[in-house]
Image: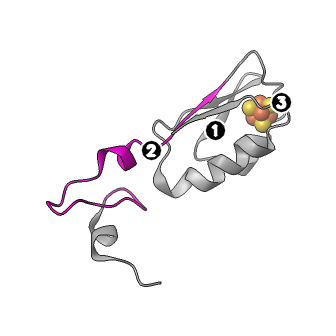
Amino acid sequence: MPEREADRSSPYSGMTMNNHGKINEREKNSMKAIVDPDLCIGCTLCVQICPSVFEMHDDKAFAYADPVPGSDIETCRDAARQCPVNAIILEE
Ligand code: SF4
């Protein structure tokens, strides 16, 4: 599918603009990832799957990308799905 003009000119990958050229605010802040430290067992799987969002702090994962960039949303969702203890909370 050809890339739309609005998508090419957006600084936020995968985001759209309204007719006035402004970034859609809902899409701009479309996802926030949070790791519940009480649930995280430090398996590092989320960091392996999505290192641009998650990193290890001592023996717990931490989501440092806030908001999650549009280009990382799918891999972030994949990391959340694969977390063995469901410690990753996604706010969309
Ligand atoms: S995948 Fe889940 S349990 Fe493993 S480090 Fe990430 S948040 Fe923690």
Determine whether 46 is above or below 4 in the image.
above
Q: Secondary structure at mark 2?
A: loop
In the picture of the structure, the residue carrying the numbered disc 3 is 85
Q: Earlier in the sequence, mark 1 or mark 3?
A: 1
Q: Measuring from the top left, give residue 25's x and y in whole percent.
A: 30, 45
In the picture of the structure, the residue carrying the numbered disc 2 is 30
Asked if the beta carbon under badge 3 is closer than 8 A to the nearest atom of ligand 1, the reply is yes
Identify which amino acid the numbered label 2 is placed on: Ser
Q: CA distance from mark 2 to mark 3?
A: 24 Å
Q: Quadrant of residue 47?
A: top right
Q: CA distance from mark 1 to mark 3?
A: 16 Å
Tag 1 and tag 3, C-beta contact below 8 Å: no
Q: CA distance from mark 1 to mark 2?
A: 17 Å
Q: Quadrant of residue 33?
A: top right
Tag 1 and tag 2, C-beta contact below 8 Å: no
Q: Nearer the viewer, residue 51 or 92?
A: 92
Identify which amino acid the numbered label 1 is placed on: Phe
Residue density around tag 3, few if under 14, some if 14–19, many if 20 or more, within 10 Å: few
In the picture of the structure, the residue carrying the numbered disc 1 is 54
Residue density around tag 1, few if under 14, some if 14–19, many if 20 or more, within 10 Å: many
